[in-house]
Amino acid sequence: MQIFLDSANYQEIEHWLRQGVVDGLTTNPSIMFKDGVYDLEEGAKRLCKLLDGRPVSVEVTTNDHEEMLRQARTFAGWAQNVVVKIPIVNEHGESCLGVIHTLSSQGIRINTTAILSFNQAILAAKAGATYVSIFAGRIADEGNDPGVAIRNVRHWLDEWNVQARIIVGSIRTSMDIQNAALAGAHIITIPPQFLPKMVDHKYSRETVRQFNRDAERALAQIEQSKVSR
Ligand code: E4P
């Protein structure tokens, strides 16, 4: 399973890349805005360079299909590791499957975003998307179990040997990460603030403290025996 960061925070991304746990990056216009990236082209190019070949999702910012195609082709020209995020529908509920299909057929990797159901995921995969982004937190907001959707989509992809990869996003708690991993996510895109919570445990600290203390006591014993010789 791969881990992507759901972020545009350069320092955080740099930090977690150094820890060796980051396989890619996802962004959206809200994340870019929150992390202070206002110039999309400059910000995306900088992030693509930092990710050094790993996939970086950059989202289109329009409801218009022709404009989506134009933006997607422009984004894809910014760096070799750009993946273009296209929503499953625009804000009027119009299908974006045609855009996904056209771009995928032209060799542009597409991450279909804002997926909240099994049916949306299988249609995006059929249209040629490289990634289908299932929004776990938003599914749960509606009172549904994201684990069921993730498990069913994974089963369907495997059953029919479809190449699309599931990205689980919209992570709200550490438990969402664990549930998504066990439900069959190929990739989980994690907001960086969850990684320290995932790595740390108070009993691990206490265990290390005990070992360090006993190592110090062993050294003290050596010193003691030198003195008494
Ligand atoms: C994933 O690719 C999205 O950027 C993100 O996870 C959306 O999360 P949200 O529901 O917190 O906006």
Image (cartoon, rainbow, N blue to C red):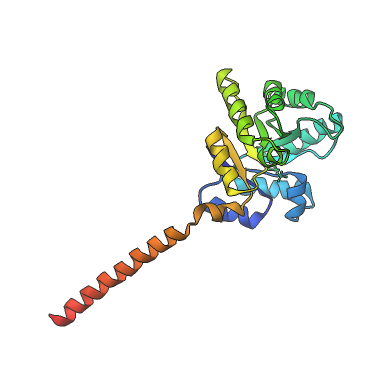
Q: Residue furthest bottom?
A: 227
Position of 215 relative to 37 (above/below): below
Corner quadrant of residue 80 = top right
Q: Is residue 90 visible?
A: yes
**Depth check, front residue: 75 or 199:** 199
Q: Residue furthest front?
A: 143
> Can you say which quadrant of the picture contains the C terminus?
bottom left
Left or right of 158? Residue 118 is right
Task: Report x, y in % for residue 96.
Answer: 79, 27
Residue shown at the point (59%, 23%) measured from the top left: 157
Q: Quadrant of ligand 1?
A: top right
Task: Report x, y in % for residue 57.
Answer: 69, 40
Corner quadrant of residue 27 = top right
Task: Report x, y in % for residue 115.
Answer: 71, 33
Residue shown at the point (53%, 51%) measured from the top left: 198
Left or right of 96? Residue 156 is left
Q: Residue furthest left?
A: 229
Task: Report x, y in % for residue 194.
Answer: 59, 52
**Depth check, front residue: 220 or 149:** 149
Left or right of 183? Residue 112 is right
Residue shown at the point (65%, 31%) measured from the top left: 131
**Depth check, front residue: 9 or 210:** 210
